[in-house]
Amino acid sequence: MADDREPPPLFDDEKPEPKDDEEDLFATPNEAPKADTKDEPASLPTEPVKDKPSDDLFAADDDLFGAQTMQGDASAPPKLDLDEPAPVKDTTGEGEEVDLDSPETEGPSSPAKMEPDSDSSPLEAPPMAEVLPPAKPVPEEKPKPTPAPRKPSMEKSKEEIEEEESGDQFTLDIKVHDPGKVGDGMGAYMSYKVSTQTSIPAFKRPSMTVTRRFSDFLGLHEKLSQKHVHVGRIVPPAPEKSVVGMTKIKMSKEDTSSTEFVEKRRALLERFLQRISLHPVLQMDPDFRDFLEQDELPRATSTSAVSGAGVLRLIKGVGDTLSKVTIKMDESDQWFEEKQNQVEALDQQLKKLHASVEALVTYRKELGISTAAFAKSTAMLSNSEEHTALSRALSQLAEVEEKIEQVHLEQADNDFFLLSELLKDYIGIIQSIRVVFHERVKSFHNWQNAQQNLAKKREAEAKFKQTGKTDKIAQVQEEIREWEGKVEKGREDFELISKTIRTEIRRFEANRVKDFRNIIIKYMETLMNSQQQLIKYWEGFLPEAKAIA
């Protein structure tokens, strides 16, 4: 059956003759031993193989596809099942099994150089030192993610704030007291004494007291705003002018409403100075130190509402309002976008709360007035009552109601000076925050305008070069250098104001939490004190009521 099968087309019954220019890949076992050749790939011999030991990969024992016997027996070798990876037996007489998967029987296409082994006929792979595999790329260590360039400055600013607040601080305590009317008629004005206690070495004296009028406070606010707002610093708002309130003071001698107005203004002026004293930059401003130290200040004429400067200030305010509507900026910084939304929401909530507290103050005052009327009526009733015990009880009740009236009025003042004024003050600070946000937008637009003008100048330079107008090139190049400087300055100004606003907002948030915490605790203490007084008064009256027989 084996003779009936035809041999594979790859082999002939007769021995193939080796050519001079290539090596016999299918040499028979009876061929003469080939001489040693140079250490080159087995598939590419460089010289004829003749009477040399065979280093052919498929010669002798390694002839995997050779015939069963190449000399006298012409029987064809059995067909190989290439689909089955079974080991192929060597029929040359050695009886060894050769595994096709073995690395010792790699084909001539293997790039590794093979050297004959004296102990065994199969060729083994040479040491790995001779043929090195391609070097694997060393994985680069990924650099650790570094924070955004602004982040360190933000954290640094926060640390500076905490250091300023918790570190060794100098004291600067300011009080506004003793308001008084100076002059008569429409030329009259209110003056206030400003007392300062400080340990800051920059001040001339540790203790000082000066007299200031309302226009001096407004002049101080204007000077600080001109120097600090355009760089992003939040200047605390000054109290608003009130033409109606001051007219009442000038025309009337003694009026309860005028006294209340003066006291409210005094509290606002004191809070204004205290907020400046808490700012680490504003408290060292020369104008602020002069305000606290100098006995006399130049009169601030530009603060008058009916002066020419006042009209110009009004026009400027209208222009700023229009610019806020017309000048827009596509905000690319998520932090600023979030803070602007937070400020807007906080402003709305504070205004609603302020309106509620104002209504509460009005209610308590009305309650005090009604309590006083009730006490007066009860006293009159006690005088007309014939029953002795009842008359005495009614008289005691009238006295208790008079005391309760004072409790209500005192609590109304606490509602106003503690809670209402704090809310109003922060509503004004939020307006100052809006101003610095708008200054940042203006700085950005100045930077963009400088870039646009620089681009136009460069286009003009290129046009002059194309048209050959060399006489104008020097001038336009000078203008280009000038606008390049303006662009660089605009970029620096924008980055500076952005960094400063970040620091100011962080300081504002820290101070806001601290202020509200302190005020709420103090306000709750006044409420508890008021309730304790009411309980004390009613407990004292209870025996009189029980004694009525």
Image (cartoon, helix red, strand yellow):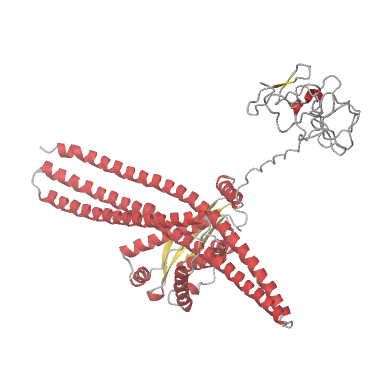
**Residue at x 19% of width, y 37% of height:** 543
Please say if 222 is above or below 426.
below
Q: Residue furthest front?
A: 4
Residue 243 at x, y = what percent?
Answer: 37, 71
Please say if 309 is above or below 126.
below
Left or right, 423 with reference to 105: left
Along the viewing direction, whichever of 415 and 332 lies nearer the viewer: 332
Q: Quadrant of residue 256?
A: bottom left
In which quadrant is the N terminus drawn?
Answer: top right
Q: Residue furthest left?
A: 386
Residue 472 at x, y = what percent?
Answer: 71, 82
**Residue at x 13% of width, y 45% of height:** 391
**Is there any visible trace of residue 339 in the rendered image?**
yes
Left or right, 8 with reference to 337: right
Q: Quadrant of residue 389?
A: top left
Q: Quadrant of residue 46?
A: top right
Left or right, 243 with reference to 432: left
Along the viewing direction, whichever of 436 and 380 lies nearer the viewer: 436
Residue 407 at x, y = what percent?
Answer: 29, 49
Along the viewing direction, whichever of 264 and 40 lies nearer the viewer: 40
Q: How many marks?
A: 0
Residue 112 at x, y = what percent?
Answer: 79, 33
**Residue at x 17% of width, y 47% of height:** 395
Left or right, 145 with reference to 55: left
Along the viewing direction, whichever of 428 and 377 lies nearer the viewer: 428
